[in-house]
Amino acid sequence: MILQVSQIDKSYGTDVILKDVSFHIEEREKAALIGINGAGKSTLFKIIAGEEEPDSGIVIKGSDRTIGYLAQHQEFGSDNTIYDEILLMKKDILDLENKMRILEKKMQHATGSELEQLMKEYTDADHAYELGNGYAYKSEVVGVLKGLGFSEDDFSKKVNTLSGGQKTRVALARLLLSKPDIILLDEPTNHLDLPSINWLEAYLSSYNGAVLIIAHDRYFINKIVTKIIELERGRATVFMGNYDDYSTKKAELFHAMLNAYYKQQEEIRHQQEVITRLKSFNREKSIKRAESREKMLEKIEIIDKPLGEEKSLSFKLTPSVTSGNDVLTIKGLSKAFDNNILFENFDFLLKRGEKVAIIGGNGTGKTTLLKILRGICPPTSGEFKYGSQVYTGYYDQEQQELNPDKTIFDEIHDEYPLMDNTKVRNTLAAFLFTGDDVFKLIKDLSGGERGRVSLAKLMLGNSNLLLLDEPTNHLDISSKEILEEAVNSYEGTVLYVSHDRYFINKTATRVIDLVNKRFISYDGNYDYYLNKKDIVMNNIFGSNTNPNVTKEPESEAKLDWSRQKELEAARRKVANRVKKLEEEISRCETRIAMIEEEMSNPAIQSNAYELTKLCNEQEELNEKLMEYMEEWDSLL
């Protein structure tokens, strides 16, 4: 066991955040901490990291174990460039490297016992340098920065000039390269695009330490963790497995708890009826028996009604007007800002009832496309046309269309004055607003709550085509599940931009990938896209196809025999390169072994010049060997 959280309590005033929270993390275990917004997840992380004190309870970590913590928001200043800031994490390696250079110079002029002592120091330093991955630290730094979405052109940017999201990525890179025994990550995917999220998944899955993540990205959680710790009503419940396992077990547990709750409520009602009857007899014995039963009732530990019963839509979201079959037609659409071409020659036909997800890296033009379709931004060339009886609705990430001074109920009722109060309440209940919650002011809501109000308002309108830009941003998992059910039950058409792969998997009937200035279509959900992506991309970009020339959306059905042959040729080329690399690796290893044998020769050991020469050659060969090994590993 590397970390133990034992009986943690935490309150702010009268608000109880954590109650008797206990769990443990094993060596190299990967776990996720989940719960609705405001459940206390970030507070618990700060307690584990030592930034806050619990009211009671204790956090125990293994002796000499280090904890690395990444908060959601990073506001730090530095005059360093991105690259230099990350290199600070390699100070031990840089110090060893400098020490080895100094020792090499000294050995050139030393003899006898002094030379022996210097050689021993050099050997120790070189061993420590190698153990610290010194011969490949530059490749490691560049790999992490590129993996997190920084290009080489970004490396020279000053940290002080970066946006909040970029600073968070720099902080994440620093944390990963510091290699603590326990990594705490609070919403690490918030500022990452899909390629970077995929890279981070692979990095954390193979990380040699323990990882504890707060995340609303269920696909991300599924890929990494083997334990789920859920915070609900201040208490922690541990579920073994990934998110899918948790979801199944949680449903089973919910139904068991709900049955226990209803059974207890029935028993309480029965006892109260008996007590009332006994008292009505107005006899001493009857009254004493009634009092005895009352005392028994007072001792019962009341079971709370489990959360979750309301998390399903009980009605279909049907637009008041049905559109024509062809909802949206796009022909030859292109967009460029000065010399920056986002996409070219986009042809697209959207049919009624489709749920289409647009994916791609940050800055590729996904949101710009939605702005063009809304008439906010003009295209550079091409045209688009909505079909018959099509009415569009747009989801605003910032919820700017909500009145902050209205209650939730009034926000919906004022928009739809002909809707009776019961329907307004039923609609809001479907989006998790029940009881007195409907009278909360918009300005007092969290981002996720405002998002749910906006979605309820949007889906009750006359729109039959919804344009959604990152609809799951700022939503906790419960709210995302509500949105999924809303989209799936919506009988209109939906076109949305998202990087939430779990959401895409649950809702999309088609995925459009914006890559290399073109849109590529996959007729299925996100898992289908992943299954077909490599084949499609190899056949489009793997041969003589120019990725800068954009054609109509490509379909996997268009793969023909000639392209299959080209794919086989590409595979043969990779196999030949692997063989060549293996030969180079063998050559380097053989020469390194020879150098080590030569350096053990007493005649060489007493010759500072020859010894330094061999050390330099060994260092160069080690660097080449690491480069060859990395390329070899990437091709397998």
Image: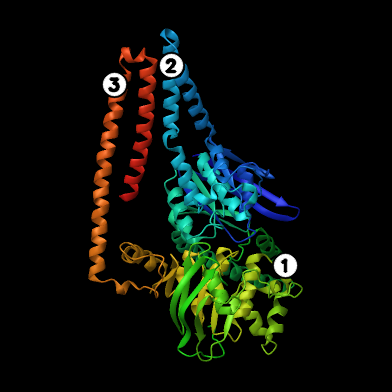
Gap in angstroms between the C-alphas marked 3 and 2: 20 Å
Which residue is the site of mark 3? 597
Gap in angstroms between the C-alphas marked 3 and 1: 100 Å
If you read the primary sequence from the N terminus, does the residue marked by circle 2 or circle 1 appear first?
Answer: 2
Q: Position of residue 221 (x, y in %)?
A: 48, 56
**Label 2 secondary element:** loop
Relative to 93, is 4 above or below? below
- Badge number at residue 625: none
Which residue is the site of mark 1? 287
Q: Amino acid at mark 1?
A: Ile
Q: Position of residue 5 (x, y in %)?
A: 57, 44
Can residue 263 be seen here? no
Which residue is the site of mark 2? 108
If you read the primary sequence from the N terminus, does the residue marked by circle 3 or circle 2 appear first?
Answer: 2
Query: Dot 2 surroundings within 10 Å: few (below 14), some, or many (20 or more)?
Result: some
Does 97 sit left or right of 408 as displayed?
Answer: left
If you read the primary sequence from the N terminus, does the residue marked by circle 3 or circle 1 appear first?
Answer: 1
Query: Dot 3 surroundings within 10 Å: few (below 14), some, or many (20 or more)?
Result: few
